[in-house]
Amino acid sequence: DQQVKQNSPSLSVQEGRISILNCDYTNSMFDYFLWYKKYPAEGPTFLISISSIKDKNEDGRFTVFLNKSAKHLSLHIVPSQPGDSAVYFCAASRRSGTSYGKLTFGQGTILTVHP
Amino acid sequence: DAGVTQSPTHLIKTRGQQVTLRCSPKSGHDTVSWYQQALGQGPQFIFQYYEEEERQRGNFPDRFSGHQFPNYSSELNVNALLLGDSALYLCASSFLRVAGVKTQYFGPGTRLLVL
């Protein structure tokens, strides 16, 4: 059962424009959400996160939005740069309890930013 | 400061064999988690080690076992290998109980191919 889903396998964007990556989850016990970026031959690297008590978190060009009622989150990258081309993973976790620290990942979205 | 290191980088085994993968955590980290990433999928949680004990386990059979040593390094063992065990195995280290979920750093992974 896929508790975290990224329904778009790939996204192509022009440099300077906005990239929007989407993620849906089904488990209402998740209270912390993260985005990771992965380049080939490297492990995932943390990008940005958001707690379930917030609906928006910004860090430079990256903004994550959380809609708890829809169980949906999105990552906005503005402006997109060719160096942003990578696989982006959405992940969900719980900040307490027996599942603390366990990350549940989506399938990933390949972002390509064209110059 | 070295990040998370994993060895070997690549490995080829045949069905039925056993394999051991190794992970050295980032300096100061005391918690190690292992993930399996099949081709085209997101990483899937295998288990987490803290204070030399398995603290959480994902939906993986007993053929998958692990160990954490006093220096916090960890091993992942897989017995009776199946073709479906072919994947990228990722190790993530963290100072989880102090610094939180988002401070999990991933290694570059070990690519296992089972023939």
Image (tube, helix red, strand yellow):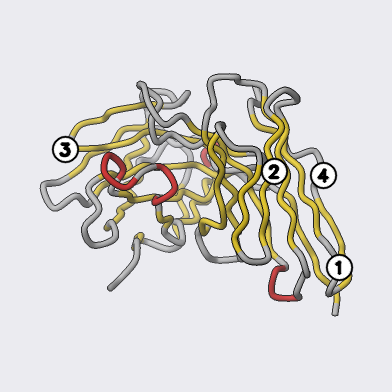
Q: Are marks 2 and 3 on the same chain?
A: no
Q: Quadrant of residue B34?
A: top left
Q: Quadrant of residue B98?
A: top left
Q: Position of residue B59 (x, y in %)?
A: 47, 23
Residue corresponding to mark 4: A8
Between B103 and B66, the one lying in front of the other is B103
Q: Pointer 3 indicates a residue of which chain?
A: B
The answer for how far apart the CA atoms under marks 1 and 3 are is: 47 Å
Task: Write the residue at 16% across / 37% down.
Answer: B51
Residue corresponding to mark 2: A65
Q: Are marks 1 and 2 on the same chain?
A: yes
Task: Write the residue at 34% across / 66% down.
Answer: B3
Task: Identify the mark at residue B115; answer none if there is no mark.
Answer: none
Task: Write the residue at 44% across / 26% down.
Answer: B58
Amino acid type for the residue under numbered disc 3: Glu
Left or right of B76: which side holds B15?
right
Residue corresponding to mark 1: A17
Q: Are marks 1 and 3 on the same chain?
A: no
The answer for how far apart the CA atoms under marks 4 and 3 are is: 39 Å
Residue corresponding to mark 3: B51
**Which tag, 4 or 2, sits closer to the chain's start?**
4
In the picture, the quarter occupied by the C terminus of chain A is bottom right
Amino acid type for the residue under numbered disc 2: Phe
Q: Pointer 1 indicates a residue of which chain?
A: A
How many residues crowd mark 4 within 10 Å: few (<14), some (14–19), many (20+)? some
In the picture, the quarter occupied by the N terminus of chain A is top right
